[in-house]
Amino acid sequence: MRWSQTFIPTLREDPAEAEVPSHRLLLRAGYVRQVAAGVYAYLFLAQKSFLKIMQIIREEMNAIGAQEFYLPALNPSELWKESGRYQTYGATLFKVMDRNELEMCLGVTHEEEMTNIARNELRSYKQLPQIWYQIQEKFRDEPRPKSGLLRLRQFWMKDSYSFDQDDAGLDISYQKHYRAYGRIFDRCGLKFVTVEAYSGTMGGTHSHEFAAPTDAGEDSLAICECGYAANLEKAEAQAGRVEDLPGDAPPEPFPTPGQKTIDDLAKFTGESRARLMKTLVYVVESKPVVLLLRGDHSLSETKLAAALGTDIFRPATPEEALELHGAHLGSLGPVGLKGVRILADRALEGRKNLITGANRDDTHLHNVTPGRDFQAEYHDIRVVSAGDLCPRCGKPIQIRIAVELGHIFKLGRRYSETMHATVLDENGKETPLVMGSYGIGVERILSAAVEQNHDQDGMFLPRPIAPFDVILTPANMDDARLRAAAENLYEEMLAHSLDVLFDDRPERPGVKFKDADLIGVPFRVTLGTRKFEQGLAEIFQRSIKKVRDVKLSEVVKCLKVEYLG
Ligand SMILES: [Zn+2]
């Protein structure tokens, strides 16, 4: 391609609306333009990069025997009602009405449609296993679309689905994906980790997430040097030990006028927050449930959903809390409550002499001991924080921000049972299909690559996913001899199948170099006036900004052999 005939609308200034480096640079480098919140147009450079990413994904999926499909984004809502996800996804699901007032929705993923095909078409265990995949648009009505291509409302996903006769078969399909995903992210040049994850609204029992550690991401990982790694939503860690006050005195009320929050109370009593107990009230499927946490811990709604077996819950209103406890928010506690379910976080198990609300306004209790003064079910319901201890080795955990790239789930019989997808087994008996589902966010790969590979001048994408391998930059297009040499070199590069962008614009060298540094192409070949007279060109490696002089006649060979493999 010749730059003079190419649409690459680079910006001189940082766009004001951009929050994270990938968003800022993809706008500045002329890759994308925003159409609406969380909806972007992909221009020439972005599309070129995405096609390379998709090709890598295709090759690795085909290599595990997966078959490529293409399903419609437009789904009958009926299918989603059948699986139950019409309710669990709620407002996140885009819903549309057709002219006959039939309600449809835009797929977030395609478990329903794939299961529907499987149940209509697969009859016998002899047809198993099957792995079906597609690279297709997905829609999520995000409450807060942000960070450029990191949280979109319309995006590409590679989603695949495996159908097996039994759990052993699922294990094999899952392992195939696990390995294919590693190869895909490796080939895309990303630094990534594989972590245990929570299945969320996908349902199922077992899942792994592939995530790229970056400074900007929407995901938090708990990582330990021993190799333990988990999504923060799923991570289990032991809280650091807290010394309890001695003595076995019964709970004793004391006045705490105007002290509402844990921080207020810690200051007022002079106690550490770890010796205070936090009381929250939630309404779970219309019934109140009291939740207890150590004062310095916070609730994980993801873990709460796992503990409760439902994600239909919300915080109680102040009025509902008042009705249950007989006191206003800020003075709530578990002592004396009757007929209500109480869930306590495991970090409270075995503790004693805690401070918590007395269920009387402006009053708290000293000496509250779980198990003696109230009964609770213990569950892991808190967010792990930095400094907690690794569940494997006991050393302190680190928290890292990351971009989620892919996620693989063992769904088991979650969809086949609710949607009645069965085949006949060896004995002619109906048996539900055992399923897995596996996703990769295509835009996430590009965004993560930018987050991991940029500096103040722009980005430098890994070669396999960069829109071009090399930019050819003649410093002066007015010099007829230099220009002719550049044209020759361009033809030679094309003849050797290099993906080259020829910067034939009549611009000053400074402008060309600035643009070249910005747009993420890993190599630049420069023909400068002085070195050209000596028969030399420069090969500039963008990631490390290293320049090397090479004989003009050996540029292509050198690029192919030493840099582009
Ligand atoms: Zn560890």
Image (cartoon, rainbow, N blue to C red):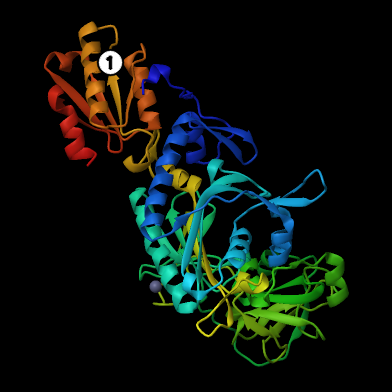
Residue 269 located left or right of residue 462: right
Q: Nearer the viewer, residue 409 or 160?
A: 160
Q: List x then y, in percent, for residue 120.
A: 62, 65
Q: Quadrant of residue 169?
A: bottom left
Q: Is mark 1 within 8 Å of ligand 1?
A: no
Q: Nearer the viewer, residue 373 or 162?
A: 162
Residue 36 located left or right of residue 168: right
Q: List x then y, in percent, for residue 358.
A: 79, 79
Q: Taking the image as drawn, is residue 281 in sight?
A: yes
Number of numbered discs overlaid on the protein picture: 1
Q: Nearer the viewer, residue 206 or 180?
A: 180
Asked if 311 appears above or below 108 in the picture, the reply is below
Residue at 67%, 76% (x, y): give it: 309
Asked if 51 appears above or below 512 in the picture, the reply is below
Which residue bears the numbered disc 1? 475
Asked if 267 appears above or below 526 in the picture, the reply is below
Q: List x then y, in percent, for residue 238.
A: 50, 77
Quarter that holds the C terminus: top left
Q: Quadrant of residue 499?
A: top left
Residue 498 located left or right of residue 53: left
- Indicate the quadrant of ligand 1 in the picture: bottom left
Q: Residues within 10 Å of mark 1 (few under 14, many from 20)?
A: many
Q: Taking the image as drawn, is residue 396 in sight?
A: no
Quarter that holds the N terminus: top left
SS of the residue under disc 1: loop
Asked if 212 appears above or below 357 in the picture, the reply is above
Residue at 61%, 69% (x, y): give it: 203
Q: List x then y, in percent, for residue 122.
A: 56, 68
The amino acid pointed to by label 1 is: Ala
